[in-house]
Image (cartoon, rainbow, N blue to C red):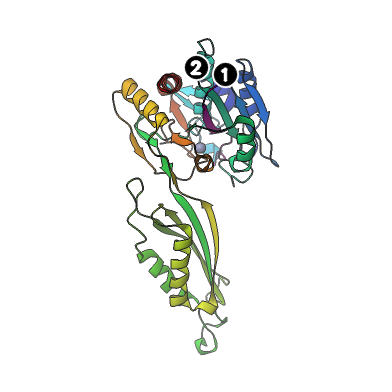
Amino acid sequence: MSAVIELSKALINRASVTPDDAGCQALIAKRLEAIGFDSHWLPRGKVSNLLCLGPGHGPLLLFLGHTDVVPPGRESAWTSPAFTATERDNRLYGRGAADMKSSVAAFVCACEALATSQPLGIRIGVLLTSDEEGPAQDGIQAVTDELTQIAGEVSWCLVGEPSSQAQLGDVIRIGRRGSLSGTVSVAGQQGHVAYPELADNPVPRLAGFLTALSQTHWDEGTADFPPTGLQITGISTDTDVGNIIPGQASARFNLRFSPASSADALRNQIDQLAAQHAGEAQISIDWHLSAQPFVSQPGALRAAVEHVIRTQSGHAPIANTAGGTSDGRFIAPLGAEVIEFGPVNASIHQVNESINLDELNALTHWYGEIIKRLAAVI
Ligand SMILES: [Zn+2]
């Protein structure tokens, strides 16, 4: 069994559902300390964060990842237990096999393989959190100040999130969209459904507003981003019976937005729509901005990743900003070039999450080649 399969299994066997790291990071720290890395523990509340810094000098390549996983869901639906790493049909099964314990293991094993070679001329760091799949408040966001105090400037950040779609390296991410959520409440007057003249039903006004929201064209997107999109994710009233006109109706919606629209501009536009359709005095919106969009301009890291994927697979990767948010959004504002490249994402957050064993071994080799390529061209 290759070192990376062994390490991936050891990580999967630790049931690290957010925010519990379950000993994954201690295992990584031990492995990296053995090849000269220094460990810096940066816990926040129940969240475990670990920064391991390699020896040597030069610009810093930071590998960014998470050791937490989403819950297994209905465990009886799994063919083998979610937290017992199992090899079957040339695949490794278990929660975190693709998102993203395997890529953490791959990067660690790539560092181990390079440890005996000449000094590279770049420094390598590994930053891990156990709060990526959760609120992400005590995770990477909370430790960026300490990261720069300890490690100095971050030149490049390689995020090991599962970016690949059908085969390893077919897609890399050069940024991510922003995420803005709103909960809208429309007030009315509760009453008997048979006496509407004595009540004021807020539902039609909410419905009008939601229709306007879903018909609005927000922007055209940019060269790197698709147009901003809005999805309504829930509708409710304060009563749940057939003979009462509700006194309040509410709904939730989420925007995935491109840099063509700012969060402030979107909020203003939506506030105006709300006033138009539901009356300013009777409508209120609670906002939650969970991610600003980011994109990295082409630099040395993207060139190295694309070169290695092209050389190893024979195909140039598609570079896009699709998918949900990632912790890369907290590192990009530090000025680092952020590129995401990791396993195939077809099974992530699903039952029977898995990774192809050949692709896991390849990922380890390719990460090593990326490090060497980056070191060679700077
Ligand atoms: Zn992930």
Magenta region includes residue 59? yes
What residue sits 43% from the left and 72% below the top? 273
Where does the magenta region start and end?
A: 55-73
Q: Are marks 2 and 1 in contact (CB under 8 Å)?
A: yes
Q: Which residue is under mark 2?
A: 120
Mark before the other along the chain sequence, 2 or 1: 1
For badge 2, the amino acid type reads Leu
Q: In the orientation shown, which residue stands out farthest toward the bottom?
A: 197
Inspect this view and state whether residue 243 appears. Answer: no
Q: Nearer the viewer, residue 273 or 231?
A: 273
Picture mark count: 2
Q: Which residue is under mark 1?
A: 56
Q: Which numbered marker is on residue 138?
A: none
Q: Nearer the viewer, residue 353 or 211?
A: 211
For label 2, the SS is loop
For badge 1, the amino acid type reads Gly
Where is residue 190 shown, x and y percent of the image? Answer: 57, 81
Residue 153 lies in quadrant: top right
What residue sits 60% from the left and 25% below the top? 53
Where is residue 135 shown, x and y percent of the image? Answer: 59, 47
Residue 176 lies in quadrant: top left
296 shown above or below 234: above
For label 1, the SS is loop
141 shown above or below 86: below
Magenta region includes residue 301? no
Q: Is mark 2 within 8 Å of ligand 1?
A: no
Which secondary structure class fits the magenta region best?
Answer: loop
Q: Nearer the viewer, residue 236 or 195?
A: 236
- Quarter of the image where the C terminus is located: top left
